[in-house]
Image: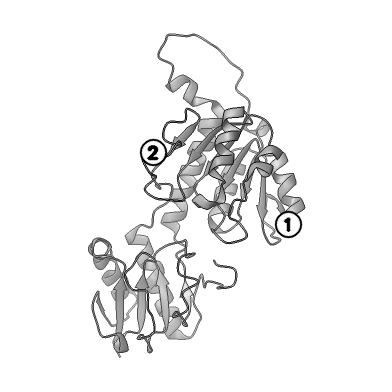
Amino acid sequence: MSLNILFAAGSRQWDDYKPHLRRALQQAGIAAELGTDMPAEEVDYIIYAPSSPLQDFTPYRRARAVLSLWAGVETITGNQTLKIPLARMVDDGLTTGMVEWVTGHVMRHHLGMDRDILNRDATWAPRHVPLARERRVTMLGLGALGQAAAAALGGLGFPVTGWSRSEKQVAGIRCLSGEAGLHLALEEADIAVLLLPDTAATQNILDAQALALMPRGAFIINPGRGPLIDDDALIAALDSGQIAHATLDVFRIEPLPQDHPFWTHPQVTVTPHIAAETRAATAAEVIVENIRRSEAGEGLLHLVDRDLGY
C-alpha cells in the first residue's frame, strides 16, 4: 500500500526537501506519494512547518501524525484543531550546528576576542586570559541541544552547570532544577547560554531580578527563544555594567525591527537566527524514520507533550 504524505512547509522548502525525502523514502522501502497539494481526506502524514498556511487540521481525518521540520513548536501546540500526534525536529545536523555556534561564541567571550578583532588604533595592551576551567558556564535548558552544547563545553574544560525546569541527570554536568536551582545557577554564571523552549513558564526567565543575580560583568548568549529575556531589563543591565555583553540570535519579533536598540547598542551582538538550522538532507532522514516507526507500530520519536509545550 502506498502512503500519501503532504508537505505543508512552503514552496521554497519543498524544492530543498523533495529530493532528500524521496531518497530517504526509497532507502527505507516506503512506497509513498509525496506532494504539496492532495485531498485532505487522503493524507496519511503531514510534514509541517508552523509558519505554514495550513492551520486547520480538522479535514485531515485519516492523518496519523504531524511531523514538524522545526525544533520549536510553541506556535502549534495550542492549535485546538490538531488532535493527532505531533513530533518536533531533533536532527543531528541541527544539533551539530547549534553546538558549533554556541561553542564559538562562548570561546569568543571567554578569550575576549572582540577586543583584538576591533582594535584598529594600534594599542598594545596585553591582558590576562583565564583558562576555561576558571570560567563558569551555565546552560539554561537541558534538552537535546542544551545537553549537546554542555557536553562540548565541558570537554573544553569549562565547569558547566545545567538548569532545567524538571530534574535531570547528565553525565559530567552539574544539574540543577527548580527556582532555588535557577538562582544558584545564575549566581555562578560567568557565561549564561539560553536553550530553553518558549513556554508560559520560561518567558522573561531573565528579567531584572534574574540578571541582578549574575556575577557583575557576565556574558549572555541566547540562541534559544527571544521571549526568554526581558529586553528592557537586559538593556538596563548592559548600560549599568552588570552584564558585559549579550550575543543574541533570536528575538521577540523577527526579523528584528531596524529601530530596535539592540542593533546599535555597543554591547550587543545581533545574529540573524542562524545558530541552528534544519538541514534538508539529515532532517529528511528523521522524518522518514518516524514514518517508518509509525507504520511499524513502534511509536514516534520526539513526540511533543502538549501540556508542557515541547
Q: Position of residue 291 (x, y in %)?
A: 40, 78
Q: Position of residue 275 (x, y in %)?
A: 43, 47
Secondary structure category for the residue under label 1: helix
Q: Position of residue 296 (x, y in %)?
A: 45, 85
Q: Which residue lies at the image location 42% right of the left edge and 62% below the top edge?
A: 70
Task: From this view, report whether residue 231 is shown above or below residue 286.
Answer: above
Residue position marked by numbered label 2 in the rendering: 259
Secondary structure category for the residue under label 2: loop
Residue type pointed to by label 2: Asp
Residue at the farthest right position: 180
Label 2: how many Cα within 10 Å (few below 14, some 14–19, many 20+): few
Q: Earlier in the sequence, mark 1 or mark 2?
A: 1
Q: Which mark is residue 178?
A: 1
Mark 1 near mark 2, Cβ–Cβ under 8 Å? no
Task: From this view, report whether residue 176 is shown above or below residue 55.
Answer: above
Task: From this view, report whether residue 26 is shown above or below residue 227.
Answer: below
Label 1: how many Cα within 10 Å (few below 14, some 14–19, many 20+): few
Residue type pointed to by label 1: Gly
Q: Which residue lies at the image location 24% right of the left edge and 76% below the top edge?
A: 35
Q: Give the mark toward the camera: 1 or 2.
A: 2
Q: How many marks?
A: 2
Residue 224 visible from this viewpoint: no
